Image: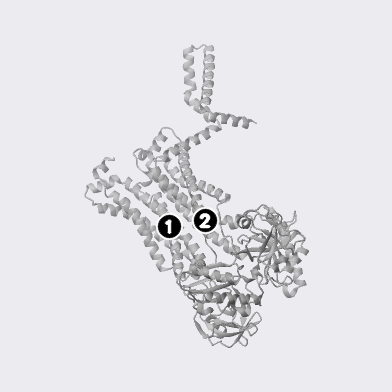
Amino acid sequence: MGWIRSLQAGVRALRDKRARNVEIEEELASYVREWTEEKVRRGMSPEDAARAVRREAGSAIAVRQQVWNAGWEAWLDRLWSDVRYTFRRLSRMPGLLFVLVLSIGIGIAANATVFAIVSKFILQPLPVGDPGTLLSIMRTFDHGQCCNNLPAPVIRDVRSMSQTFSDVAAYDELLPASMGGGAEPQRIWGQATSANYFDVAQVSMAAGRGFAAGEEKAPVIVIGYRLWQQMFRGDPEIAGRQIQVSGHVYTVVGVAPRGFRGLDQILDPQFWVPLGDLGELTANSPKEDSRTTQWLRAVGRLKPGVTREQAAHEMDVIAGRLAQMYPATDKGNGLVLESVGDLPARDKRSMQFFLMALSAIAFLVLCIACANVANLLLAQGAQRQREMAVRLALGSTRGRLMRQILMESTLIALAGGTAGVLLSLWATYALSSFRLPVPVAMDLSVHVDWRVLLYSLLLSIVAGVLCGFVPSWAASRPAMPNALKGEDALARPGRRWSLREVLVATQITLSLVLLCGAGLFLRSLEKASKIDVGFRSRGLVMMSIDPQLHRYTADRSIVLLKDVLERIAALPGIRSATLTDGVPLSMGHRSDGFEVPGRPKPQGQNVVELYMAGPEYFETMGIPRIAGRDLANENAAAMKVGVVNQEFVRRFFQGENPVGHTVNGAGVPYQIVGVVGDTKSRTLGEQQRPVLYRSIYQNIASDPSQDGYTVIARYEGDPAALTKSMEGAIHAADRSLAVFNVQTMEEHMNDALFLPRLVGSLFAVFGIAGVLLASIGLYGVMSYAVSQRTKEIGVRMALGARASQVQAMVVRGGLRLVVIAMVLGVPLALAAAKLTRSLLYGIAPWDTTTFTVVPLLLAAISLLACWIPSRRASRVDPMEALRTE
């Protein structure tokens, strides 16, 4: 227990250092007294004995310091002394401190923001009990593709056959519903689950309970925490209360805990109902006995002591048994296990590649920031070399000098880390505002959590050590004769390159790579905004309704949609109006394989995009009609008709007129009645897809939309006022209808540019940060070079050099670094650009404009960073300069 006594003694000494010094002095005095008395007993006179003791014992101060240094508390005391010295020193140069903290802050902010994304989608476990034993069950097919969803009978088979899972739960992906009633009902998203869902997930409810074993078909509901707070104001008596969802009465049995959004990382359900009650919320619920309809997700809870490998082996066995029992539907299919919330392997690889690319970009920014700080600290160290040489000459150790400079850089980095976290808070808020053009509720918000704070702290410490190591090493080893004369050993005339110049060249090189990436994506965004989408987006407004949320049958839906369309078309300012089940440039469209009787099937290119469209669709959208007629109020009992685009004609009819011909898709024949121009279907950069537009009134009964129906109107006047009028017309037809996705087509197209805007914004922010840091570094190097060459400049001007010649001399020195950095940076930027080829629209990775403008812009900024110090150099007074020596 000696270490405890040592710890207690050290703490007492640190708490009252003066008392400890008095105690040491008393012990020394006692020792000197005893030693003197011993020498007197041996025959020496008291005066000689005292003199001999002082000579042999040495300085009392040195002995006292030696005794103090023997304890562990001395190291802590010296460290605290270094901290106080660093604070005093930094407080005397606020301008430089601001630049250093800002530099590190930008680098830390970039990495903290990226790590916040990683924490959200990779590291953050779902709020369930023991997530390591909760596994998602997925299906693979004989062609290698993996599917998240399984047929209901397969899940029942797995549940009954499995010996490694204690239980298996199932849930639907997302289910739209209407809630709120009154004048402004809201469309919300939920999930239908098996009754054991919350038990298998081991979710602790915020209020009430989950589903009971006998509630597979009961009208009960669990609501999300956010919905509980926003719509029900956190009512503590919510359990047992009855609410209406899509016109159906449910009894609330529980509230999910804060942060629980189901078992997927990005989906955002706000309620859960039993699977057996799904038919009450939608007229299009899949058949529970179908072995081919992939519509449910499954999760299993491992039994205690069972490993994931054992469960995976059992899944292989079960898949083999199912293939033997149901060869028509299950042969060649497998079952695989993934951690709950994980994406399928292919999507996971894409996500990991995206995050690795972001991490690499953020790391480049941090490298630039560290190089900038190291450069400025080197310049500071060079100015302090005389001080360091004097301290070494007076007995200070190199280790003490290095520790002080490392302490300085670490404290600067910690302050920069704090600034970086604050910047990251803003950046994550900005990222969370981006919207994906998808028809379902997704939670893409990222936040700064404890993982991000810990990561930022560790990164700040590492950055502080990296920034300070070279400056501390250089400053603690001055060339004594030169340092005592105030000369910089790192910038002696004999050196072709100084370390500071190497760091600045590196900064400019990396900044060029980032700026070229930003330029490419900004150019790509410009090109994407000018791509011909095939329709006239200006002057279109749209909003969606979903009759299924209100238990409309197919016949009633047709009557409702016709009524809504007539009311909107009659509004002042509306030129024309139509209906569709899917808007161009959005995800979630249906597609199916098609063939033309009597003609060869296009090899691997027979998949066709399917839209449902109402009367005047092509006129309203501004899509040119090439041949035939438009869709009208088609008879639901007659043969189904369709209008195809030009790409369909090219693939299936080799350019011949298809009007009057019949095509088959999913076993359904369609008679082609018209041909229209091509439009972009899902993304701006896609290859043109074949499209079949079907009559909305002929297909509602057999193929109802899962995402509702969108009213599109071409208008004149103020869109904000017209949308209010359109919503009023819809509520006049049925005041309980929820209206959602209200926006202009131009706003929708902006949403469709989500990915290029996001990547372009990130590159632009990181590139601007890199250029800012590199410019500061270049300015610092040139300013320091001017200060070190004051005497030389004075001599030159005394011998007749003009101010313009001095300016040119200084600028040439800086531009030399810029040119070399560009020679290295352009090939690196080209190599990096090739990796982003798939994200670019309408331009090549080696876009001439980008790789011309960016280097010129960087050169101009660098020229400005060199010109300011050169201007100061040209104003040096020769006499004052010569007096500096």
| Label 2 with label 1: CB-CB less than 8 Å | no
- Element at badge 1? helix
Indicate the quadrant where residue 567 lies: bottom right
Q: Residue furthest front?
A: 732
Indicate the quadrant where residue 828 lies: bottom left
Q: Nearer the viewer, residue 280 or 770?
A: 280
Q: Position of residue 308 (x, y in %)?
A: 71, 58
Q: Identify whether 188 is placed above or below 58.
A: below
Which colour style is shown?
one colour
Q: Which residue is mark 2?
A: 429
**Left or right, residue 606 beside residue 418:** right
Indicate the quadrant where residue 92 lies: top left
**Left or right, residue 314 beside residue 883:** right
Depth check, mark 2 against mark 1: the one in front is: 2
- Number of other residues with Cα within 10 Å of mark 1, as a class: few under 14, some 14 to 19, many 20 or more: some
Quarter holding the N terminus? Answer: top right
Q: Name the amino acid, label 1.
A: Ile
Q: Name the amino acid, label 2.
A: Tyr
Distance in Å between CA atoms under marks 2 and 1: 20 Å
Q: Residue at x 28, y 46 (%)?
A: 792
- Number of other residues with Cα within 10 Å of mark 2, as a class: few under 14, some 14 to 19, many 20 or more: some
Q: Earlier in the sequence, mark 2 or mark 1?
A: 2
Q: Position of residue 331 (x, y in %)?
A: 72, 73
- Element at badge 2? helix
**Left or right, residue 392 beside residue 658:** left
Q: Nearer the viewer, residue 767 or 450?
A: 450
Q: Position of residue 201 (x, y in %)?
A: 70, 57
Q: Which mark is residue 186?
A: none
Q: Nearer the viewer, residue 138 or 5?
A: 138
Q: Which mark is residue 768?
A: 1
